[in-house]
Each structure stands twice: as structure tokens, then as C-alpha cells.
Image (cartoon, rainbow, N blue to C red):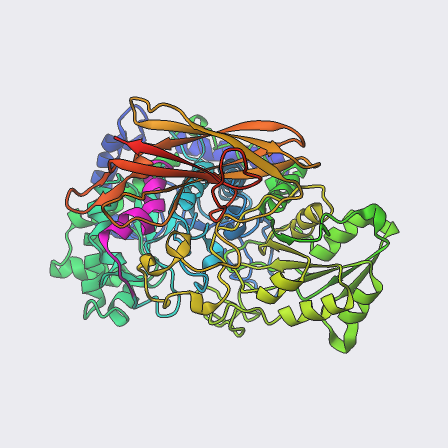
Amino acid sequence: MKITPLTILLIYLLVQFSVHAQTTYPFQNTTLTDNQRLDNLLSLMTLDEKVDALSTNLGVPRLGIKDTGHSEGLHGMALGGPANWGDFSNKTNPKTYPTTIFPQSYGLGETWDPGLIQQVAGIEATEVRFYTQNPILHKGGMVMRAPNADLARDPRWGRTEESYGEDAFLGSRLTVAFIKGLQGDNPKYWKSASLMKHFMANSNEDGRDSSSSNFDERLFREYYSFPFYKGITEGGSRAFMASYNAWNGVPMVINPLLKNVTRDEWGNNGIICTDGGALKLLVDSHKAFKTLTEGAAAIVKASVGQFLDTFRPSICEALKTGLLTEKDIDNAIRGNFYVALRLGLLDVDQSKVPYAGIGVTDTISPWTKPETKAFVRKVTAKSVVLLKNSTGLLPLDILKIKSIAVIGPRANEVLLDWYSGTPAYVVTILQGIRNAVGKDVVVYYAPSDDMDNATMAAHKADVAVVCVGNHPYGTDARWMVSPVPSDGREGVDRKALTLEQEDLVKVVLQANPKTVMVLVSSFPFAINWSQEHVPAILHVTNSSQELGNGLADVLFGKVNPAGRTTQTWVKCITDLPPMMDYDIRHGRTYQYFKGIPLYPFGFGLSYTTFSYSGLKTSKPKLCDSITVSINIKNTGMRDGDEVVQLYISFPDSKVERPIKQLKGFKRVFIPAGATVKVEIPLKATDLAYWNVEKHAFIVEKGKVILMLGSSSEDRPLTPEGGIRKSLMLSVAMK
């Protein structure tokens, strides 16, 4: 039988007719309050059904609640990819289920554009609904394990690629944006459910199953938990995954923070789940309990309602021996069904759920739409960071180039990371350059310098583009293996920051002084030699299906780059404190780093220039907020984006504060020659520190220095100066 949209619609209507024929329970009554519906549902469930509900399955078949589970989705819904998300059983001839794949989260962060990030997540959520609701495909689950709200305090962390960088404020803004995109803007129903990873302070892979992240309460409140706090209280997420590690000796999966802070203070009345295998690790690695039964009981009592490993025998034994009660399980799983309620799974009448038609009545595959492909290309181009352009080599002028050499191991491949899905297509850098230059420009290609191939290609060409960088899972699909020391991945931290492939860059530059280095990487690298010698350097992350086209748009000036670094790129691994030192005050991140970085946090160049003037603040309002405004002029010949960054410092503080902190930013488009007034709100609460004695965020009286500029390292100038440099203003908090 040929499957047509009409066939799918008929199947959907048949299912709906069957559902309407079922007995209506009070929990299906949308006029009742959420709590009334959940109370009724729990009262109707058997103990056996409640134990089943401790899985990632949100369904209760006997009561007509259809199932949905989890999906991965850090930068696109993951169905397939290197990790085989979706668990397709036919290994010899697997069927692929394509999804739209954006740059890695690290690259999304480098856009510094919350509105763009929200759109990315919105497209992902549409594809989630499409796959889960389409009666023919029916893949994945509507609870999305995204975003990763962990902070990349150290560039050696193996999962840096999953983060939005080292800064709590930037991370919180992008986390909130991604959550809003995933969940949609309907006040009653979610498009998909955002489950943040991994609460919290999970930024070492080596020994993560038994290690403890140790730091004080102020760093917990002000830094490590801050993106999660904002994700719940502002973004609206009602789900997160507890991390493997401990905090100050107490494993997170049983830590009192889960209930006392995230539920009781912040209001997470939804899902808390373990990470994969965490129950067994709690016993075998953390040595917190002697038996799985004791461990399972402690996890449930900590208000964790979903296990990502084998749990049923241990839970049943805990119930039998009195370590757990049915009420304990009720308290833990209640949040699971709150999420199901918000997804519309408890409703009989799906016509009231605004997303119920995706994949059912709307059957055009989202990943095939031209506007989706164009958007991925736009996002990729906006994520590119121009690290150096000392001779004005970029942008390349197609009219003046007769030949170009595209060289390197990353030139003709798009590497998907462990949390990628399978895109419908990919465009490599080589293909993107060929697309851009057309048939009138000769393109030489050499993946390496075997038999001097790279040298010869570079020597023959007018300009050389050498593409180097890391492999997202270390060229080895085996779990927790990363053969190259400077590579990293889940389960393996990096042991080096230097780039072995930089030798290829040296060879190419020797053959052709007009060399552009393209660093395709998930992490910062200590590319000191290249920074000193190569005339132009671009950074872009792995995995985007439009990697080649997006990068080519920047190379040839179709897009003026405005990406910014989200970490401090150090010059040497010895610039970093020990890996397991979680006290960032010991010289970690731009907030406390006192050395000279290779590239500072928030750094990125442009093909045009900007000048800053007229820094002002509004008078404080009753709500204790001000607006910081500045005039920015595009003083160059090209239209472009500028990322305006607001930093603060506290010279008179009576408590230890960072050297400076990001507290506002805005990416703005400014036409050549035009001046734009940029306004950034600053709330008094953004100036607060956590007072341990008062157990609250407190705003100190005294002087606050405001600095507006284009990176964390711009030096303050007087209002008369300021070409792409920061301006400084002092205000008094009363």
C-alpha cells in the first residue's frame, strides 16, 4: 500500500476515535487544576504501574496515556549518528532517519545570539514532534536531553563541545533561549520538554563516576548552578539529569540539593532523572551503599523519578523490606506526569494541543524544507569566529583569484559528534568552496602532505586554505577511547592543548604566504605559532550539515564574521590550575585569570571597524534597574554585526568578587557608515552576590564599574576615543 498524507490522516482519525471511545477519567479533564489531575492519576495507578513509571517511559497503557521517552538533542534531534541513537537493530542495512543538524553547542554559543538559538531549538522541537507523532515513523521521545547547562571551566574537559562556554551569565542566557525554543510559546502546552544536563559541576570526564567537585556555597549559587537556576526559574524547564559526580563528597544523584534547592526553592516540579548507569555506579564507584537496593531507595527518596539503568529488582526489594514506601514513589514520579501533562499526553482531545498535527496533518518533512537548510547555513556562518586577519587577506576576492588550494584532514569531511543525529546531507568545506567559486576558479585539494601533495597544491594556488582540527570521538568509535592526546570526548579528558596538525599549517604557509588557517574544532587549542605567523585564522565547530557553505560565506565575504569566543584560550596548558581544582578563584576563566591569553573570552574580529561613544546610564527605576546605552558607529566599508558586551567590577567590595563579570550583551547589525544606539538592561539583581549567612543574593552598596566593549579584554578609553574598545563608567549602588 502506498503511504500518502491521506493515509496518515485516516490512521490519526481512527486512533482519535478509539481514544474518545475510552472511559474518561478526571485526570483527562482539562478544566481541573494540574494538581487535581495529577492527584487523580496517581490514585488510579497500581503500585506495579508506579514502579514502571520510574523508567523514562511516561505512558500508562491501561489508563490510555500513550508513551513518550527521551531523545538527545544538543544541536539537532539525534536519531542515528555515531552513537546510533534510536537503537536501530538492522546493523547490516540500517534505515536512516534524517534530522536537521546544526553546529555543535559550542559553536551555537559562539554566535552570542539568544534569539537565533531559540529558533534552532524550535526547529529541533518541530522535528521531535514530527518523528514521535507520525504513525509511520514513530521514533524518539518528546523529552529532550538538552541543553547542556554545565560550564566549561577548563578547556581540557572532554565534553566542552556540548557547552556554551565558561561564563555563567552567557551560559544562562543561551540555556534559557534553547529551553524556550524547545518548549514553545504556548502558555498551556509544550512543543517538547527540555531536560537539562547534567546537574551539576560535571566538567571532568576522567574518573567522573567517583570524583567529587569541591567548592563552596557561593560558587554553587553564583557559578556552577546558575544556568540551571535560570533554566528553571526563567526558561521554564521542568526537568534535568543529575550528574555522575559528587559535590563536596555527596553524590549528586542522592544529594539533598535535588529536593531542598531545585524543587523546594526553584520550583522544579517535573522530572529529575539519573544519568546512565548511575545506580550501579553509586554502589560500585562512589561506594555510597553496600547494595543496589539501598542505593535505589536513596535515589527515590532524593526525589529522583527516572532511572536510566536497571532498577526494578532493586526497587521491588526496597518496597518489600520497607526501605521505600508507595508514598515515596508517588513523590518521585509525580513530576514525570506533570511533564506528560504539559506535553498534552493526559488529554483525550488532542485538537486542543497546538502541536498535535505536526507529522500527522502536516506531513512535509521539516529537514527537507529549503528555508530550514538556508537557516542552518545562516547559523553556521554566524558561529564563525575570525581570530586573526592581520594583512587583510580575508575576505577572499573571487574576482582576483584564479586558483585556490584546499588542504587538510578536515577539508573534505563533516564529522558528526557522539550526540549528533544523521543529517539528510552534508556540505564539506571543499564542496562549499567549490560552490562559492564556480567553474572559473581552479580548486586543488590535498588531504595531507603525503609525497608533498599539500606543499605542491599550496605552491600552485593563488591562496591556500588549510583545514585542521580535532576529531569529536577521537577517530575511534570504541567507548571512552581518544587516541590523540589533544582530542577529548565523553569519558575522556584532553591531555594536551597543542595541535599536532599545526605542522601541516607550517608546511602550507612555507609554500604559500597567502594561507588561511581554518580551525575546525570542538575546543580551544594553543595555536601560538599560527597566531604569530599565519595571516588569517578562522574558528568553526564540527558537525553542521552546512559547514562548507556557511564557512565559504565568511571566507568570501558574503557574511561578515561576528562570532565570539566563549572561553579563555590560554597559551599553554601550564596556564591552567589542576584539572580537579573546581575553585575557579584560583586563576580559572576570564573572571580570575591574571595571565595573558592567546584569545580572551568574548573575542572575535570583523571585516569592518566600529567606534564606541556616548556611554550613558538611565536613572535607576523603582525596580532598581538601569539601562546602559552606547552609540556604535560602523567606521568601515562593510555592513556587519557587532557583539556589544557589558562587564562589571566592584572595586570597593567587602567580599571577594571576580576581576570582572559579564552582565549583558547584544549582537547588533550596523550598516557601513551608520551609527546605532545600543541599549542593554542591567538589573540590580545582576550585581548581587550570594550571602551565605543570610542565604540570599545581596546587592552591596558602593561603587560599580561598568565596562562596555567588544571583548573581556578591551581596555577602557575616554569617551572621545574608543575604536572597538571599551568605555568605562562608575555608578553608585545605594
Could you say where residue 93 lies in the image, as x and y percent from the top left?
Answer: 62, 62
- Of residues 714 and 38, the one nearer the viewer is 714
Q: Is residue 114 magenta?
A: no
- Indicate whether 112 appears above or below 204: above
Q: Which quadrant would the N terminus be assigned to in this image?
A: top right
**Left or right side of 631 for 606:** right
Q: Which quadrant would the C terminus be assigned to in this image?
A: top left
Furthest residue in direction bottom, as rendered: 451
Residue 256 visible somewhere in the drawing: yes
Q: Quadrant of residue 289?
A: bottom left
Picture residue at 57% right of the left edge, 46% below the top: 563
Picture residue at 61% right of the left edge, 58% below the top: 520
Furthest residue in direction right, as rendered: 440
Could you say where residue 471 lies in the image, as x and y percent from the top left?
Answer: 57, 65
Picture residue at 78% right of the left edge, 75% below the top: 452
Could you say where residue 387 lies in the image, as x and y percent from the top left?
Answer: 60, 53
- Of residues 618 and 354, the one nearer the viewer is 618
- Of residues 12 and 37, the one nearer the viewer is 37
Furthest residue in direction left, as rendered: 322
Magenta residues (range): 212-235
Exactly how many numbered labels are in the figure? 0
- Indicate whether 329 appears above or below 521: above
Could you say where residue 554 lies in the image, as x and y percent from the top left?
Answer: 68, 46
**Left or right side of 47 for 274:** right
Q: Does the magenta stretch include residue 215?
A: yes
Residue 195 visible somewhere in the drawing: no
Classified by dominant secondary structure, the portion drawn in magenta counts as: helix
- Indicate whether 687 appears above or below 252: above
